[in-house]
Amino acid sequence: MKIICVGRNYTDHISELKNEKPEEPVLFQKPDTSILLKKQPFFIPDFSNDIHYEVEVLVKIKKIGKHIQEKFAHKYYDEIGLGIDFTARDLQNKLKEKGLPWEKSKAFDGAAVISDKWLQKEELPAVDALNFRLEKNEAVVQSSSTAHMLWKIDELIAYISSYFTLKIGDIIFTGTPAGVGKVATDDRLVGYLEDQQMFSIKVK
Ligand code: ZN
């Protein structure tokens, strides 16, 4: 399986990092080795002093597809999850300055938190109006709705599949809203989708 991530998909987050608003979705991937193993804490890697959490709505692909039309995209997923795109911001900024790929700052071991739980889209409000939030040590640090995405889930599936064939089990990280920030040892990160707890991660 592969993980395809979307960068800069919420305007409030684009402004907080002083990035330009992209003309097309920004895409990158994380390897399967970046998935944080179930029930395991997230260990801050020694190559960074500035690991940021980014809470993101996840979409799990259930059918193989290439060049999927936006109007058919809804047939390619049933399950919605929640995750964290951990980012070594200091390293990412260095790589960005030099025009180099972000890979090392986003694809390292443990950098992809994927909820244990997946919710059926039929049981949820419209996928373009899902509320989600991240709490750090019981304080809300990120809170948004998929309604604020620049590119909605079906548009993303159409766009992504024009470059990468989507396969069963692939997961899309759909981008993070404002409020990203640094993690420290002993933090607890808990994610909620429509008030259902989706994951709880300890930082070490
Ligand atoms: Zn992200």
Image (spheres, rainbow, N blue to C red):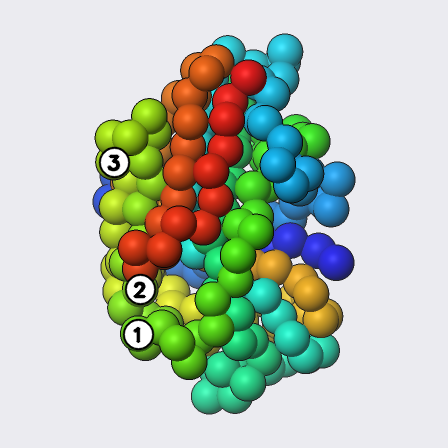
Would you name the residue on which mark 1 appears?
A: 125
- Closer to us: 64 or 20: 64
Given contact means CB atoms under 8 Å apart, are the residues at marks 1 and 2 in contact?
yes
| Res 31 quadrant in image | top right
Mark positioned earlier in the residue sequence (1 or 2): 1
Mark positioned earlier in the residue sequence (3 or 2): 2
For the residues marked 1 and 2, what is the alpha-carbon distance in whole angstroms?
A: 6 Å
Q: Give the x, y percent position of residue 54.
A: 42, 38
| Res 190 quadrant in image | top left
* Left or right of residue 142, residue 167 in this image: right
The secondary element bearing badge 3 is classed as: strand
* Left or right of residue 175, residue 86 in this image: right
**Label 2: few (<14), some (14–19) or many (≥20) C-alpha neighbours in 10 Å:** some
Q: Amino acid at mark 1?
A: Pro
Label placed on residue 130? 2
Question: Measuring 44% from the left and 60% from the top, which residue is drawn there?
Answer: 24
Taking the image as drawn, is residue 94 in sight? no
Would you name the residue on which mark 3 appears?
A: 140
The secondary element bearing badge 2 is classed as: loop
